[in-house]
Amino acid sequence: MKPMKLAAFAALIAAPAAAENWDMPMAYPDSNFHSQNGKLFAEKVAACTGGALTITIHAGGSLFGGADIKRAVQTGQAPIGERLLSAHANEDPLFGVDSVPFLATSYEQSDKLWAATKDAIGEALAEQNLVLLYSVPWPPQGFYFKKEVESIDDMAGTKFRAYNAATAKLAELTKMLPVQVEAAELTQALATGVAEAFISSGSTGVDSKVWEQLTHFYDTQAWLPRNTVFANKDAFEALDQKSRDCLLSAGAEAQAEGTATSAALAGGYLKTLAENGMKVSAPSEALKAGLTEVGAVMAADWEAAAGDKGAALLEAYKAQ
Ligand code: PCA
């Protein structure tokens, strides 16, 4: 009897903790590289935890729309989620550092800007009951129009789809009419005339098959905004140490791999736009010069909003 009892006891203490499943809302389409990278992240977490923590991806805004994901995770309605953090720059200017025009315009610079600001961004998120897990840049941002645009004067009066405060400000400074539209509703907004132009990556242009409505893409490489994945702090802290470590290590891997994927795909998206009949080109000198001026105004605005803390981070970025 005795040995059997011991064996039963051993089996009991060796039994894995009840498996936990987290639902992860993401705003962009299932086929988008961020969503696919989210799935790879989920697979890594499952493998690392031996199935103790699994993550179910809900792409395309199917669980929460983009605008609601951050609040949902903060309040624990979802334990984890992905969001374009710059859309929350009104809460903390730091969240918008990736959308300051012409501050970081290549993958290399984007990595450096992230390295200089990630701790401060992580702290700002922690104050909002969030744990930073990883962040992946979109390809560089260019302008989509349905006419030739030679200078910013040609933009005036255009209904311009904005995805954050920076893109709305850019529209105002170029005398366009900003309208906030999530990527999930972009196709419809273009089809119904709610918007007739926007700034984004080739990735979102391809996702939305914008060649059905628009004709010109100007490859301005203005900035590389990021999608950031965070967990609810209470949900994170309720996990065992191993699961927490796995989330962080899988996040680090997903960030490196997602960034490499973004860079590898960037050129192909522009090719796809051209193959579908769009005129893809560099901006004219006049357009470049106008956007540089607008960008300088926006950079000064950001610095004023971000104060000494922002200035120190910019210095750290530029010193790299
Ligand atoms: N695509 C997202 C954000 C930046 C990008 O390239 C969008 O347009 O909503």
Image (cartoon, rainbow, N blue to C red):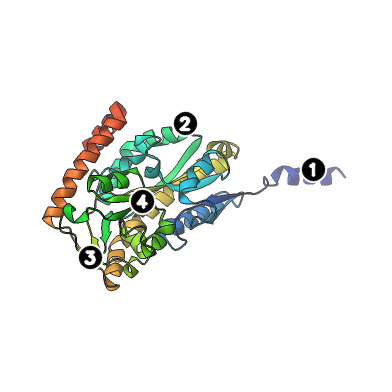
Question: Which of the numbered marks, if any, corresponds to residue 280?
Answer: 3
**SS at badge 4:** strand
Q: CA distance from mark 1 to mark 3?
A: 72 Å
**SS at badge 2:** helix
- Judge depth for marks 1 and 3 and give the one in front: 3
First of labels 1, 2 by sequence position: 1
Ligand 1 shows up in the quarter that is: bottom left
**SS at badge 1:** helix
Amino acid type of disc 1? Leu
First of labels 2, 3 by sequence position: 2
* Label 1 environment density (alpha carbons within 10 Å; few <14, some 14–19, many ≥20): few
Q: Say which of 257 and 92 sits in front.
A: 92
- Judge depth for marks 3 and 4 and give the one in front: 4
Q: x, y (%) of residue 203?
A: 35, 60
The residue that label 2 is drawn on is 127
Is 76 displayed left or right of 88 in the figure?
right
Q: x, y (%) of residue 87?
A: 39, 44
Query: Splitting the image into 4 quarters, where does residue 193 fall?
Result: bottom left
Query: Splitting the image into 4 quarters, where does residue 307 fall?
Result: top left
**SS at badge 3:** strand
Amino acid type of disc 3? Val
The residue that label 4 is drawn on is 179
